[in-house]
Amino acid sequence: MNETTTGEESPASDLQSGRLSDFAYSSIKEQLTRGAYKPGHKLPIRSVAEMLNVGATPAREAINRLVFEGALVMVGPKTVIVPHLDLAALYEVTQMRLALEGLATEKGALRATNDVVDKLLALQEKITFSLDEKRYSDALHDNKEFHFTIYRLCEMPHLLSTIEALWLRVGASFHDLYPEFAEAKYGVHNHMAAIEGLVDKDPSAVRAAMENDIRDGYRRLKKAAQERLRR
Protein backbone atom coordinates (compact mmCIF):
# COMPACT_ATOMS: atom_id res chain seq x y z
CA MET A 1 0.00 0.00 0.00
CA ASN A 2 1.30 3.47 -0.85
CA GLU A 3 2.18 5.79 2.03
CA THR A 4 0.13 8.95 2.28
CA THR A 5 1.78 12.34 2.06
CA THR A 6 1.62 14.38 5.25
CA GLY A 7 2.76 17.67 3.71
CA GLU A 8 5.74 17.83 6.06
CA GLU A 9 9.21 18.41 4.66
CA SER A 10 11.40 15.36 4.32
CA PRO A 11 14.75 15.04 6.16
CA ALA A 12 16.51 15.57 2.82
CA SER A 13 14.50 18.75 2.28
CA ASP A 14 15.36 19.98 5.78
CA LEU A 15 19.04 19.31 5.13
CA GLN A 16 18.95 21.22 1.85
CA SER A 17 17.20 24.15 3.52
CA GLY A 18 19.82 24.12 6.28
CA ARG A 19 22.63 24.22 3.78
CA LEU A 20 21.05 27.10 1.91
CA SER A 21 20.52 28.94 5.20
CA ASP A 22 24.20 28.48 6.07
CA PHE A 23 25.18 29.67 2.60
CA ALA A 24 22.99 32.76 2.91
CA TYR A 25 24.32 33.49 6.39
CA SER A 26 27.96 33.17 5.30
CA SER A 27 27.37 35.32 2.24
CA ILE A 28 25.68 38.18 4.10
CA LYS A 29 28.21 37.94 6.92
CA GLU A 30 31.11 38.30 4.48
CA GLN A 31 29.45 41.29 2.84
CA LEU A 32 28.97 42.95 6.23
CA THR A 33 32.57 42.40 7.34
CA ARG A 34 33.81 43.86 4.06
CA GLY A 35 31.68 46.97 4.40
CA ALA A 36 29.44 46.22 1.43
CA TYR A 37 26.51 47.88 3.23
CA LYS A 38 26.39 51.24 4.93
CA PRO A 39 24.67 51.70 8.30
CA GLY A 40 20.96 52.24 7.74
CA HIS A 41 20.87 49.96 4.70
CA LYS A 42 17.69 47.84 4.61
CA LEU A 43 17.86 44.10 3.92
CA PRO A 44 14.40 42.86 2.91
CA ILE A 45 14.05 39.09 2.90
CA ARG A 46 12.83 39.06 -0.69
CA SER A 47 15.81 41.11 -1.90
CA VAL A 48 18.28 38.91 -0.02
CA ALA A 49 16.65 35.76 -1.44
CA GLU A 50 16.84 37.11 -4.99
CA MET A 51 20.40 38.36 -4.58
CA LEU A 52 21.64 34.98 -3.33
CA ASN A 53 19.29 32.88 -5.48
CA VAL A 54 17.79 31.09 -2.48
CA GLY A 55 14.27 30.75 -1.14
CA ALA A 56 12.63 33.06 1.37
CA THR A 57 13.05 30.59 4.25
CA PRO A 58 16.87 30.29 4.06
CA ALA A 59 17.12 34.07 3.63
CA ARG A 60 14.89 34.66 6.66
CA GLU A 61 16.83 32.19 8.80
CA ALA A 62 20.14 33.80 7.85
CA ILE A 63 18.86 37.29 8.66
CA ASN A 64 17.45 36.11 11.99
CA ARG A 65 20.84 34.65 12.94
CA LEU A 66 22.54 37.95 12.14
CA VAL A 67 19.93 39.87 14.15
CA PHE A 68 20.59 37.57 17.09
CA GLU A 69 24.33 38.26 16.77
CA GLY A 70 23.75 42.01 16.69
CA ALA A 71 25.04 42.49 13.15
CA LEU A 72 21.55 43.49 11.97
CA VAL A 73 18.69 45.17 13.80
CA MET A 74 14.94 44.64 13.49
CA VAL A 75 13.27 48.08 13.39
CA GLY A 76 9.82 46.93 12.30
CA PRO A 77 7.77 43.78 11.73
CA LYS A 78 9.41 43.21 8.34
CA THR A 79 12.23 45.76 8.35
CA VAL A 80 15.83 44.83 9.10
CA ILE A 81 18.66 47.33 8.81
CA VAL A 82 22.43 47.50 9.21
CA PRO A 83 22.95 49.42 12.47
CA HIS A 84 25.31 52.18 13.51
CA LEU A 85 27.54 51.33 16.46
CA ASP A 86 26.91 53.67 19.38
CA LEU A 87 29.85 55.15 21.29
CA ALA A 88 29.84 52.50 24.01
CA ALA A 89 29.77 49.60 21.56
CA LEU A 90 32.40 51.23 19.37
CA TYR A 91 34.73 51.65 22.35
CA GLU A 92 34.22 48.07 23.49
CA VAL A 93 34.77 46.60 20.03
CA THR A 94 37.88 48.73 19.55
CA GLN A 95 39.43 47.63 22.84
CA MET A 96 38.83 44.00 21.92
CA ARG A 97 40.22 44.55 18.43
CA LEU A 98 43.41 46.08 19.81
CA ALA A 99 43.99 43.10 22.09
CA LEU A 100 43.01 40.30 19.74
CA GLU A 101 44.19 41.65 16.39
CA GLY A 102 47.42 42.75 18.03
CA LEU A 103 47.90 39.22 19.38
CA ALA A 104 47.16 37.59 16.02
CA THR A 105 49.54 39.97 14.26
CA GLU A 106 52.44 39.39 16.62
CA LYS A 107 51.99 35.60 16.75
CA GLY A 108 51.99 35.26 12.97
CA ALA A 109 54.44 37.94 11.86
CA LEU A 110 57.46 35.65 11.61
CA ARG A 111 55.55 33.29 9.32
CA ALA A 112 55.23 35.90 6.57
CA THR A 113 56.87 34.68 3.36
CA ASN A 114 57.87 36.69 0.33
CA ASP A 115 54.63 35.58 -1.32
CA VAL A 116 52.63 36.99 1.59
CA VAL A 117 54.49 40.30 1.38
CA ASP A 118 53.89 40.44 -2.38
CA LYS A 119 50.17 39.77 -1.84
CA LEU A 120 49.96 42.55 0.76
CA LEU A 121 51.74 45.00 -1.54
CA ALA A 122 49.33 44.16 -4.36
CA LEU A 123 46.33 44.58 -2.05
CA GLN A 124 47.61 47.90 -0.79
CA GLU A 125 48.10 49.11 -4.35
CA LYS A 126 44.44 48.29 -5.05
CA ILE A 127 43.32 50.00 -1.82
CA THR A 128 45.27 53.15 -2.59
CA PHE A 129 43.89 53.30 -6.13
CA SER A 130 40.32 52.86 -4.85
CA LEU A 131 40.83 55.63 -2.28
CA ASP A 132 42.20 57.99 -4.93
CA GLU A 133 39.14 57.22 -7.08
CA LYS A 134 36.80 57.67 -4.09
CA ARG A 135 35.59 54.08 -4.49
CA TYR A 136 35.38 53.52 -0.77
CA SER A 137 33.40 50.26 -0.88
CA ASP A 138 36.12 48.74 -3.06
CA ALA A 139 38.77 49.98 -0.65
CA LEU A 140 36.96 48.40 2.30
CA HIS A 141 36.58 45.11 0.44
CA ASP A 142 40.35 44.84 -0.04
CA ASN A 143 41.12 46.31 3.38
CA LYS A 144 39.49 43.32 5.04
CA GLU A 145 41.60 40.95 2.97
CA PHE A 146 44.76 42.91 3.83
CA HIS A 147 44.14 42.62 7.57
CA PHE A 148 43.13 38.98 7.54
CA THR A 149 46.05 37.98 5.32
CA ILE A 150 48.21 39.04 8.26
CA TYR A 151 45.95 37.63 10.97
CA ARG A 152 45.68 34.20 9.33
CA LEU A 153 49.44 33.79 9.72
CA CYS A 154 48.94 33.14 13.44
CA GLU A 155 47.28 29.79 12.64
CA MET A 156 44.91 30.16 15.61
CA PRO A 157 41.40 29.43 14.27
CA HIS A 158 39.48 30.28 17.45
CA LEU A 159 41.22 33.64 17.68
CA LEU A 160 40.43 34.33 14.02
CA SER A 161 36.74 33.48 14.45
CA THR A 162 36.51 35.91 17.37
CA ILE A 163 38.17 38.66 15.33
CA GLU A 164 35.75 37.97 12.47
CA ALA A 165 32.84 38.39 14.90
CA LEU A 166 34.17 41.83 15.83
CA TRP A 167 34.48 42.83 12.17
CA LEU A 168 30.92 41.65 11.63
CA ARG A 169 29.80 44.27 14.15
CA VAL A 170 32.02 47.11 12.95
CA GLY A 171 32.38 46.49 9.20
CA ALA A 172 29.53 48.73 8.07
CA SER A 173 30.71 51.56 10.33
CA PHE A 174 34.00 51.72 8.44
CA HIS A 175 32.17 53.86 5.88
CA ASP A 176 32.38 56.67 8.44
CA LEU A 177 36.15 56.73 7.91
CA TYR A 178 35.74 58.50 4.60
CA PRO A 179 36.59 60.84 3.05
CA GLU A 180 38.84 62.05 5.90
CA PHE A 181 40.71 58.77 6.31
CA ALA A 182 41.35 58.57 2.59
CA GLU A 183 42.56 62.15 2.27
CA ALA A 184 44.99 61.88 5.20
CA LYS A 185 46.16 58.41 4.07
CA TYR A 186 46.26 57.16 7.68
CA GLY A 187 45.53 53.59 6.67
CA VAL A 188 48.02 53.65 3.81
CA HIS A 189 50.85 54.72 6.12
CA ASN A 190 49.95 52.13 8.76
CA HIS A 191 49.68 49.32 6.22
CA MET A 192 53.03 50.16 4.67
CA ALA A 193 54.61 50.23 8.14
CA ALA A 194 53.15 46.78 8.80
CA ILE A 195 54.61 45.44 5.55
CA GLU A 196 57.98 46.94 6.43
CA GLY A 197 57.86 45.19 9.81
CA LEU A 198 57.09 41.86 8.13
CA VAL A 199 60.05 42.29 5.79
CA ASP A 200 62.30 43.15 8.75
CA LYS A 201 61.00 40.15 10.73
CA ASP A 202 59.98 42.48 13.56
CA PRO A 203 56.71 41.24 15.15
CA SER A 204 56.54 44.15 17.59
CA ALA A 205 56.76 46.68 14.77
CA VAL A 206 54.03 44.91 12.80
CA ARG A 207 51.78 44.80 15.84
CA ALA A 208 52.37 48.48 16.54
CA ALA A 209 51.49 49.39 12.95
CA MET A 210 48.23 47.42 13.00
CA GLU A 211 47.28 48.79 16.42
CA ASN A 212 47.93 52.32 15.14
CA ASP A 213 45.62 51.55 12.23
CA ILE A 214 42.87 50.53 14.64
CA ARG A 215 43.41 53.58 16.88
CA ASP A 216 43.45 56.01 13.96
CA GLY A 217 40.25 54.46 12.67
CA TYR A 218 38.63 54.63 16.09
CA ARG A 219 39.28 58.36 16.40
CA ARG A 220 37.49 59.00 13.12
CA LEU A 221 34.61 56.61 13.89
CA LYS A 222 34.18 58.15 17.35
CA LYS A 223 34.01 61.63 15.83
CA ALA A 224 31.35 60.49 13.34
CA ALA A 225 29.30 58.89 16.13
CA GLN A 226 29.48 62.08 18.21
CA GLU A 227 28.38 64.16 15.23
CA ARG A 228 25.30 61.94 14.81
CA LEU A 229 24.37 62.48 18.46
CA ARG A 230 24.43 66.24 17.99
CA ARG A 231 22.08 66.19 15.00
Image: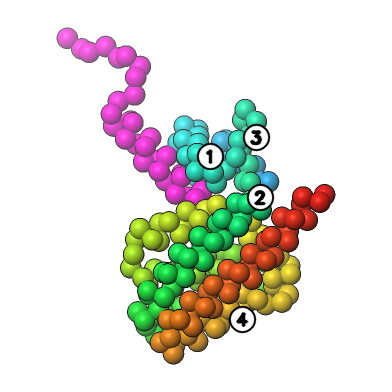
Q: Residue at x 67, y 77 (%)?
A: 185
The label nearer to you, 2 versus 3, is 2
Which residue is at the far left? 1
Nearest to the eye among marks 1 and 2: give it: 2
What amino acid is at disc 3?
A: Val
| Amino acid type indicated by mark 1 | Val
Query: Is there CB contact under 8 Å for labels 1 and 2?
Result: no
Q: Position of residue 44 (x, y in %)?
A: 60, 37
Q: Secondary structure at mark 1?
A: helix
Magenta residues (range) = 1-30
Q: Earlier in the sequence, mark 3 or mark 1?
A: 1
Q: Residue furthest bottom?
A: 200
Circle 1 is placed at which residue position? 67
How packed is label 1: few (under 14 Cα within 10 Å), some, or many (20 or more)? Answer: some
Q: Is residue 8 magenta?
A: yes
Mark 4 closeness class: few <14, some 14–19, many ≥20 residues within 10 Å: few
State the residue position of label 4.
189
Percent position of residue 78, x then y: 61, 30
Whole-angstrom CA distance, mark 4 to mark 3, is 39 Å
- Relative to 162, does residue 145 appear above or below in the rendering? below
Is residue 228 shown left or right of residue 54? right
Circle 3 sits on which residue?
A: 75
The kind of secondary structure element at disc 3 is strand
Give the answer, above or below, for where 69 lies relative to 222: above
Give the alpha-carbon distance from disc 2 to disc 3, as whole Å. 16 Å
Disc on the earlier residue, 4 or 1: 1
Residue drawn at x 66%, y 50% is: 86
Kindly report the distance in space between the C-alpha atoms of the residues bearing marks 4 and 2: 27 Å
